[in-house]
Image (cartoon, rainbow, N blue to C red):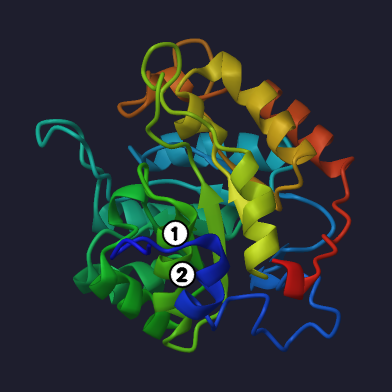
Amino acid sequence: MKIAGIVRLEDISKLCPLISRKTDSFADDNSETRKVQVGRVCFGGPRPVVIAGPCSVESYEQTLEVALAVKAAGADMLRGGAFKPRTSPHDFQGLGLEGLRILREVSRETGLPVVTEVMDARQIEQVAEHADMLQIGSRNMQNYTLLVEAGRSGKPVLLKRGMAANLCEWLGAAEYVAKEGNFNIVLCERGIKAYPSGEYSRYVLDLNVIFAVKEHTFLPVIVDPSHATGVSAMVEPASRAAVEFGCHGLIIEVASDRLGAPKPKCDAAQAIGPATLARIVEFAAAHNDEPLKVNAHAV
């Protein structure tokens, strides 16, 4: 018996024919990962990409300080939220357009490409003007209007997994972007709500899904250990584990550890310092991921 609305893994190629390994024709041996280029940075290559920066853009000085530390640590891209979706409407929501301008200026000064979140289809043009890559956050993974407009923008898209989404739903969201002719999609596992979420970590980091993603699609997949754990001390071991599992990159929140530096207004508990980031970058750089050999007919 088939229950309405339930999609089995073997049906993914029907649900997502554009991004499925079974129907893809760009790789002759059906084992490659699509290379997604963001400026000089390439996702899906042999070396994991490391994206790092503040959770939210709070000032030019704060963002530049963290960006310079991120660059010195060897990271490849800068992250930072100009628009911040928060659980409470009374919490800091980001600087908006001013935050975008700060990110663009800091990117020019450091040479680091920028990824930042877009929350509304009406923001696409504005965010695309300032960012090198558009991030669709967990809360918006199934905002289909936003996904369509992000696909039409032509910008590379970083698509985070919904905090309660299964693999089929996540890949289905990616298919919306691909349907607009935009295959420059990077998937991001950021932790899911499951027992015992919240007891000793923010979410449950689903590393098993990395292998499943590689089985079913040619899109690169990265991991967000900051949101997954919610605890700064867990970020480094979670990052190492994700790299060992074969992810194509990491996206990590970093804050200044300078004496007297202001505490971040958003997710301070999960932000690591530049020295920890440097160790993670060094570990990631030493791990070259061999392409996953997949028998498409057995998936």
Secondary structure of the residue carrying tag 2 is: helix
193 or 181, which lies in front? 193
Residue 137 locus on image (x, y percent): 36, 52
Look at 54% across and 40% down and name the residue there.
Answer: 224
In the image, what residue occupies the spot 38% across and 12% down?
199
Q: Nearer the viewer, residue 79 or 260?
A: 79
Asked if marks 1 and 2 touch (Cβ < 8 Å), the reply is yes
Of 275 and 87, which appears nearest the observer? 87
Does 2 sit above or below residue 53? below
Q: Which mark is residue 170?
A: 1
> Label 2, on which residue?
174
Across and down, in percent, residue 291 comes to: 85, 61
Task: Give the Cα distance between marks 1 and 2.
Answer: 7 Å
Q: Amino acid at mark 2?
A: Ala
- Quarter of the image holding residue 218? bottom right
239 vs 133: above or below: above
Q: Check disc 1: other Cα within 10 Å, few if <14, some if 14-19, many if 20+.
A: many
Please provide percent x and percent y for residue 162.
37, 49
User: Residue 112 location, x and y as percent?
Assistant: 62, 55
Residue 279 vs residue 5: left or right? right
Q: Is residue 2 visible?
A: yes
Q: Is residue 104 visible?
A: no
Give left or right: position of 251 versus 297: left
Q: Give the residue displayed 42% in from the left and 64% down from the top.
A: 7
Q: Residue at x 72, y 35 (%)?
A: 73
* Secondary structure of residue under mark 1: helix
The circle on residue 229 is: none
